[in-house]
Image (tube, helix red, strand yellow):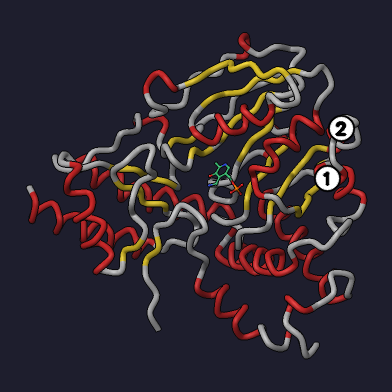
Amino acid sequence: MKRVHNFSAGPSMLPLEVLEKAQAELPNYQDSGMSVMELSHRSGLFTDIITEAEKLLRELMNIPDNYKVLFVQGGASQQFAAVPLNLKKNGKADYVNTGSWSKKAMKEAKKFIDVKEIASSEDENFTYIPEVSTSTIDPEADYVHITTNNTIEGTAFRKIPNTGNVPLVADMSSNILSEEIDVSKFGVIYAGAQKNIGPAGLTVVIVRDDLIGNASEQCPTMLDYQTHSESGSLYNTPPTFGVYIAKLVFEWLKELGGLKEMQARNEKKAGLLYDYIAQSDFYRSPVKEDSRSLMNIPFVIPDHDLDAAFIKAAQAEGLETLKGHRSVGGMRASIYNAMPVQGVEDLITFMQKFEKEHQ
Ligand code: PMP
């Protein structure tokens, strides 16, 4: 069977074990004579799946009891609107601008509330994570929004800012489940599934109880956290197959040793690649050392004309989707949880070969 090392930023690799389990169970799930895709979302079998998915996610992330887990649709992009609509009290929020996705989140929130940019790294093309000092936070702000991992720029918050009594909201789309975090530091965490959770179409929202039930009047029913909270994410038809695959991914993570083990693996993988780039005079990382992502690693070569040759030659060796985002250029290796260490080692071997041939 052909399987490549897929370095896509998302949708991205899923663990082969998960795909194989889903394949084996596909036509006849637990002797129901149906696939999960064909099961009623109100059936006992699906109730078991969604209940178990939530239980596993709570266990993996150590989610405190005063937080709800919601399985919704619309992607992280929908949360750009859902957050201000649910948290609107004083009608203003503080945003940290660390790249394309933060900008989109701010643009959307501006439709509903006053948005203040309290820190930004735009001055240096988003190659670092700016300092967020507590004194810049408006104590009357409804929330502070950060993007914990910047998928396109390859930066990540290595330290979570202290926002005091102002709820911290995080877009964790590209680093959820990649390392241990303290959920209690956040008011809301949201993430599209298509990187570390499962297939596109599912969005996970983790929200503190006291931030539910205060949505502004204009908030559509489907964006109101209360709708999904009081119905156990079954107000309407949830993305059932996505929830099922997420459950398999959570089981896979638990079996591996949970987020502690995953973090160690991710640090190892990213370390191998950053160390290799650092000692090379050919490749260069555009990102400041203290702001580097464990998940998305952009790198450039001196002659941009060689980018296309790099991508093509890599592809011939089963190393797929290494092209950098069009706004940054160069290359980007996305090495989410499902990427094995071997994938990174094979990439480095290829990079060494390419360097020798083109130096
Ligand atoms: N935020 C971040 C950090 C992302 O990486 C992405 C998708 N790549 C999004 C938001 C948008 O997510 P979605 O496509 O699920 O709306």
Vertical side of 264 occupied by 103: above or below? above
Furthest-top residue in view?
135
Q: Which residue is mark 1?
A: 65
- Looking at this view, is 330 or 298 the one in front? 330
User: Any mark on residue 289, and which?
Assistant: none
Left or right: 226 as drawn, with respect to 252 = right
Left or right: 239 as drawn, with respect to 338 = right
Residue at the image position 63 percent from the left and 16 percent from the top: 116
Dividing the picture into quarters, in which one does residue 123 lie?
top left
Dividing the picture into quarters, in which one does residue 162 lie?
top right
What amino acid is found at the position of numbered circle 2 in the picture?
A: Gln
Query: Where does residue 353 sit, x and y in percent of width and height?
Result: 14, 59
What amino acid is found at the position of numbered circle 1 in the picture?
A: Asp
Left or right: 120 as drawn, with respect to 66 = left
Say whether disc 2 or disc 1 marks the residue closer to the N-terminus.
Answer: 1
Label 2: element kind? loop
User: Any mark on residue 218, and which?
Assistant: 2
Vertical side of 25 occupied by 300: above or below? above
Residue at the image position 80 percent from the left and 37 percent from the top: 208
